Image (cartoon, grey):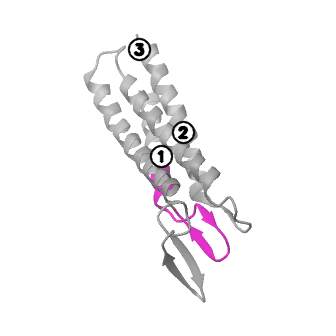
Amino acid sequence: MLVLAGIVVVHITTIILLLVATIDNAWWITNTVSTDLWGRWELTGSDWHYVNLKDYPEEFLQAVQATSVLACVFAILALFVFVAQLFTLPKGQRFTFTGILQLIACLCIMIAASIYTAELHTSDTEGGYGHSYVLAWISFVLTLLLAITYLVLRKKSE
């Protein structure tokens, strides 16, 4: 029972990290600019001003946005499915669908972070990746570990 509680805690932590990575404005930062998946904040004087992401290749930006949101959706859905499977399915059949949903969430966040790395900010000479970008990669690792854990738990139950 303690193992299941630990898994739920890690799963909720992963969901929170995914949401922060998707929503927060620190994927690319400089001294005067903070960029997220949805917009860009520029420091002029002492005020931050929102600017659209007009200089970004639209197809890549939309792919990153969509896969980040999908990763959040699949991770949240996996948590609900996990709880439902825990109480409804017999041993040996549990956690398969949850593991698959977690694996899809893992792939979605990997695709988002990989496209962001490969296609956006490649020509920028100033700045670096912010904490939201790092959280996205940490979420990738956690969702992959959870997917493997769910699939291993399914096999141990048989």
Per the model, the C-alpha gap separating discs 3 and 1 is 25 Å
Numbered disc in front, either 1 or 2: 2
Dot 1 amino acid type: Thr
Per the model, the C-alpha gap separating discs 2 and 3 is 22 Å
Image spot of residue 18 (x, y percent): 48, 50
Crowdedness near tag 3: few (<14), some (14–19) or many (≥20) residues, C-alpha within 10 Å: few
Per the model, the C-alpha gap separating discs 1 and 2 is 9 Å
Numbered disc in front, either 2 or 3: 2
Whether residue 158 is situated above or below residue 97 in the rendered picture:
above
Q: Which residue is mark 2?
A: 142
Residue at 57% x, 49% y is: 115
- Answer yes or no: do the residues labelled 2 and 3 have beta carbons within 8 Å? no
Image spot of residue 66 (x, y percent): 43, 51
Q: Which residue is mark 1?
A: 13
For this orientation, the residue located farthest to the top is 158
Dot 3 amino acid type: Ser
> Which quadrant of the rendered structure holds the N terminus?
top left
Whether residue 3 is situated above or below residue 10 in the rendered picture:
above
Crowdedness near tag 1: few (<14), some (14–19) or many (≥20) residues, C-alpha within 10 Å: some
Q: Which residue is mark 3?
A: 157
Say which of 109 and 152 sits in front.
109
Q: Secondary structure at mark 1?
A: helix
Dot 2 amino acid type: Leu
Quadrant in which residue 77 is drawn: top left
Image spot of residue 102 (x, y percent): 44, 34
Q: Earlier in the sequence, mark 2 or mark 3?
A: 2
Residue extent of the magenta highlight:
16-36
Q: Secondary structure at mark 3?
A: helix
How many numbered discs?
Answer: 3
- Answer yes or no: do the residues labelled 1 and 2 have beta carbons within 8 Å? yes
Whether residue 65 is situated above or below residue 104 in the rendered picture:
below
Crowdedness near tag 2: few (<14), some (14–19) or many (≥20) residues, C-alpha within 10 Å: many
